[in-house]
Image (cartoon, grey):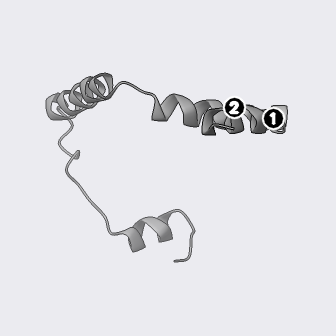
Amino acid sequence: MSDKEKVIQLLDKVPDYKIGYVLAYVQGITADEEADDKICDILLQDYLNDKDPDKHDTITIEEFAKQEGLTL
């Protein structure tokens, strides 16, 4: 039995409420790399063109955790 056939067989055992996770994963691994690069370029340009003067402000992971009420 091929790997593809094994995957198809296993899909029959996946509960309906988990199929969305499988679908998202398969879509992710079959996504077009060029399309991903275009999206990243758009996001970068949006960030670079953002006029917000605070966009470069940073905090440590510890500060963020405290702000969110989390313990590291």
Q: Residue furthest bottom?
A: 72
Quarter of the rendering containing residue 35: top left
Quick check: 26 above or below 62? above
Q: Residue at x 30, y 25 (%)?
A: 39
Left or right, 68 with respect to 59, comes to right
Residue bearing mark 1 = 17
- Alpha carbon separation for disc pair 1 and 2: 7 Å
Quarter of the rendering containing residue 7: top right
In the depicted view, which residue is nearer to us: 44 or 20?
20
Badge 2 density bin: few <14, some 14–19, many ≥20, Cα 10 Å = few
Where residue 14 appears, as percent x and y from the top left, is 80, 38
Quick check: 27 above or below 52? above
Residue bearing mark 2 = 20
Q: Residue at x 49, y 71 (%)?
A: 66
Badge 1 density bin: few <14, some 14–19, many ≥20, Cα 10 Å = few
Q: Quadrant of the N terminus?
A: top right
Labels 1 and 2 touching (C-beta < 8 A): yes
In the depicted view, which residue is nearer to us: 26 or 10?
10
Where residue 55 appears, as percent x and y from the top left, is 23, 45
| Residue type at the position of mark 1 | Tyr
Where residue 48 appears, as percent x and y from the top left, is 15, 34
**Residue 47 circle label:** none
Q: Residue at x 53, y 62 (%)?
A: 68
Quarter of the rendering containing residue 44: top left
Left or right, 31 with respect to 71, comes to left
